[in-house]
Each structure stands twice: as C-alpha cells, then as structure tokens.
Amino acid sequence: MMPMLAFMKKEILETARTGKLVILVLLFALFGVMNPAIAKLTPWMMEILSDSLAESGLTVANVQVDAMTSWGQFFKNIPIALIAFVLIFSDSFTREYRSGTLLLALTKGLSRYKVVLAKTVLLFSQWTLGYGLCFSITYGYTAYFWDNSIANNLLFAAAMWWLFGVWVISLIVLFSSLLQNNTSVILCTGGIVLLAYVLRVIPKSKAYSPALLMNVNSLLSGVEGTKAYGEAALVAVVSAAIFVALSVLNMNKRQV
C-alpha cells in the first residue's frame, strides 16, 4: 500500500509542478463564473444589438432570463471543459512511457495494477474537483441572481453529466494502456464518444447510450423523469468498470 500512496503523491506533485492543477482550477472556475454572467448579460447584449437588427428588418423582443438560462449555459459549456480536461490529462500514462519513470516505479515494487488504479483514482478525483468547482460557483451565483428551485432535478442532472465525464475518463485509461502516445489516445476516445452519440440518435439504442447522459435539458424542464436515464447510467457504470479492468490486463502484458 505504501508504494501506491508514494506513487499517488508523486503524481499529485507532478500535476502541480507542471501547472496542470492551476490550469484545471482556473478553467473550471472561469466556466463557473461565465455561466450566470452570460445569462445576466444576455438582455443587455440583445438591447445593444436591437438597433442594428432593426435596420435589417428584425425585431428583438424583450429577453427574460432566469435560473434556467444560467443552467442552460452550464450544460452548454461543460462539454468544452471536458474536452479541455481530456487534452490536458490524456498524457497521464503515455508521459510515463516516454520518460521511463513507470519502469522505475515498477522496479521499486509497485504492482502494475496499482499503477492503473492510482492513475484512475487521480483522474476521477481531478475531474470531480474541477466539475464540482464549476457547479458550485454556478449554483452560488445563480442562487444570488435568481431562484435555482425552478430547475427540476438539478442535482440529478449534474450527477448524470459527472458520470458521463467519468465514463470518458475510463476510455482514456483504457486506450492509454494500449497506445503509445496521447494523440492516439485522444483520437480513439473521441471516436468511441462519437459512436455513443450516434447510438443516441438511433431510437432502439438511445436509452442505453452513455451519450444520453449529456442530454439533460428535458430533465431540467421536467419533460423527462429520472427513470429515463437509468439504463444509460447503468451502461456507463458497468462499461467504465470493464474499461478499467481491461486496462489492468493490458498493463500486465505491456512491455515498458
């Protein structure tokens, strides 16, 4: 257990030393502030544009904003934050292959499966940290300006999107155990996410696609209930566990 804890400490220090932790905090904090800010400024921006639009024959009605506008921005912007997260941390494994530090850790008695588990736990923790920070800032400012209670199933919707992020990160772990460079990891992860999105469009497979977890607007508006996401959430949890298990098997066979 001690070698694994030492390895995790090394990973945390590495993340802090390379500036990734600072970037993570600043990025998600920025998005957290932007969501209610954009919603609050929307009427003002539309008022400024109304004169130029009127010259084109378009009439701009009074724009009413509320908590739903802010949360709509949150769920529009969080995919961008997830993409940035993937780009920042996609080299979590491949960096070790290039530098040879993984081999050094293994020679000191750290088991290969502990390497996978340690990195997986840290990636999940970093995603949770960033996502939780963004959600908390958005929630606080939205509550200050409007009433969060008009958003139905808000915490459940946020949990579904967090779970989707966990599922994507498990793909990073899987492909990192198979591939040599982070560019390949990003492309393969993006390919599977795209496939899940295509499956979401097909009526017969829609309920089982993890990509359904991104579509929470109908949940917030009360059109859909929480039960509509049960199958997709289960598939995401089970497949993420399988991906991590396969990563352990791949790492045990890998030449480092």
Image (cartoon, rainbow, N blue to C red):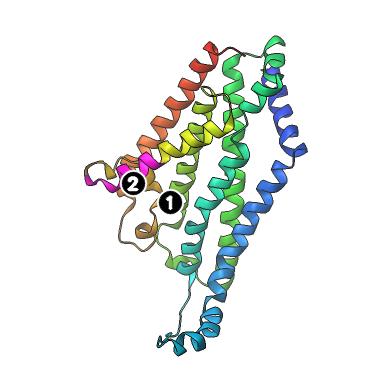
Q: CA distance from mark 1 to mark 2?
A: 10 Å
Q: Position of residue 139 (x, y in %)?
A: 56, 61
The quadrant in which the N terminus is found is top right
Query: In percent of the image, x 56 and y 50: which residue is there?
Result: 81
Question: Principal SS element in the magenta part?
Answer: helix
Labels 1 and 2 touching (C-beta < 8 A): yes
Q: Nearer the viewer, residue 12 or 190?
A: 190
Q: Quadrant of residue 113?
A: top right
The quadrant in which the C terminus is found is top right
Residue 200 painted magenta = yes
Query: In percent of the image, x 73 and y 22: which residue is there?
Result: 6
Q: Is residue 143 visible?
A: no
In the depicted structure, whether residue 184 falls above or below residue 116: below
- The kind of residue tagged 2 is Tyr
Query: In percent of the image, x 31 and y 54: which residue is there?
Result: 225
Q: Residues within 10 Å of mark 1 (few under 14, many from 20)?
A: some
The mark total stands at: 2
Query: In percent of the image, x 73 and y 27: which residue is there?
Result: 10
Q: Position of residue 134 (x, y in %)?
A: 59, 54
The residue indicated by pointer 1 is 156
- The kind of residue tagged 1 is Phe
Q: Quadrant of residue 217?
A: bottom left
- Over which residues does the magenta segment extend? 194-203
In the depicted structure, whether residue 144 falls above or below residue 185: below
In the depicted structure, whether residue 101 falls above or below residue 22: above
Q: Position of residue 36 (x, y in %)?
A: 56, 67
The residue indicated by pointer 2 is 229
